[in-house]
Amino acid sequence: MTNKAQDEIIINGFKHLKYDAVEFSENEMLERAEKFYHFMDKRRSIREFSNKDVPRSVIENILKTASTAPSGAHKQPWTFCVISNKELKRKIRVAAEAEEKETYENRMVDRWKNDLAAMATDMHKPFLEIAPWIIVAFKRAYEYESDGTKHNNYYVNESVGLACGMLITAIHNAGLVTLTHTPSPMKFLTKILKRPDNERAFLLLPVGYPKDPVYVPDLKRKPLKDISVFYD
Ligand code: IYR
């Protein structure tokens, strides 16, 4: 009798497939881990974009990558709204700048403004019109069944946060740049994009090429010893 593992089995009545493991030798693993770290360490948040077009198929693959993220009970509680339409981008910029004006003038305490000084941000958000694409990640708090009943999703913030992290990684992998922009409150996006009441705007990301040249603040990342504790 051969000992060949079955390609699929049934658990709790659900089909499970044999996992097709991605495996590397220990040397290869180390090299890949190091290389990927150095590649990701080159990622920076960019606030000034070129208006150069990015093909829609690149954006589609980036979105499919984001949607490989793990999620509570695999509900994939996200909708990515993808905007290239000039009129919509203008509307979003105008509404975002109105909220940002209020935020910078009346909502931010001095300590917050001081913390942001290095990033040189202000209420003006021209990138919302200049970048060829804007992605707005919406979290889906609940789903409607066909009979109209509502079912809450699970770990919605964690799930959408993970998907956005993978989205940002995929954007960098494609050689493009983005910014995790958080105009607050973001209710205006529900209105402009005509989203249903089970969706809440979570994060707004302009995507494109950087302006050339573009400058980023000289920030340092915390060393490993300050972000981790090993229990050997
Ligand atoms: N949402 C504002 C302010 C802002 C807040 C934080 I915290 C930042 O890291 C950056 C900006 C804006 O987008 O300008």
Image (cartoon, rainbow, N blue to C red):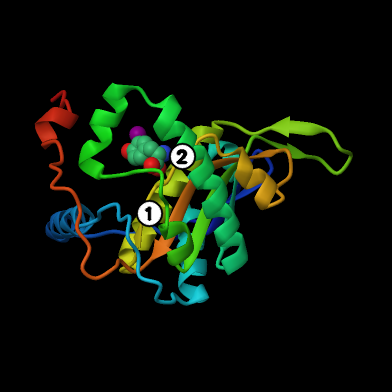
User: Which circle's residue, 2 or 1, is located before the other in the chain?
Assistant: 2
Describe the element under mark 2 as helix, strand or loop. helix
Q: Do we see residue 17 in this rendering?
A: no
**Residue depicted at x 47% and y 55%:** 66
| Residue that carries the numbered disc 1 in the rendered image | 168
Left or right relative to 139: residue 22: left
Percent x, y of residue 185:
54, 34
Q: Is residue 179 above or below residue 145?
A: below
Left or right relative to 113: residue 65: right
Query: What amino acid does circle 1 point to?
Result: Ile
Percent x, y of residue 171:
37, 61
Specify whether tag 2 is near ligand 1 (CB below 8 Å): yes
Say which quadrant the C terminus sits in. top left
**Residue depicted at x 16% and y 60%:** 35
Q: Is residue 144 above or below residue 69?
A: above
Q: Do we see residue 128 in this rendering?
A: yes
| Residue that carries the numbered disc 2 in the rendered image | 100
Percent x, y of residue 24:
23, 60
Q: CA distance from mark 2 to mark 1?
A: 23 Å
Nearer to us in this view, 157 or 125:
125
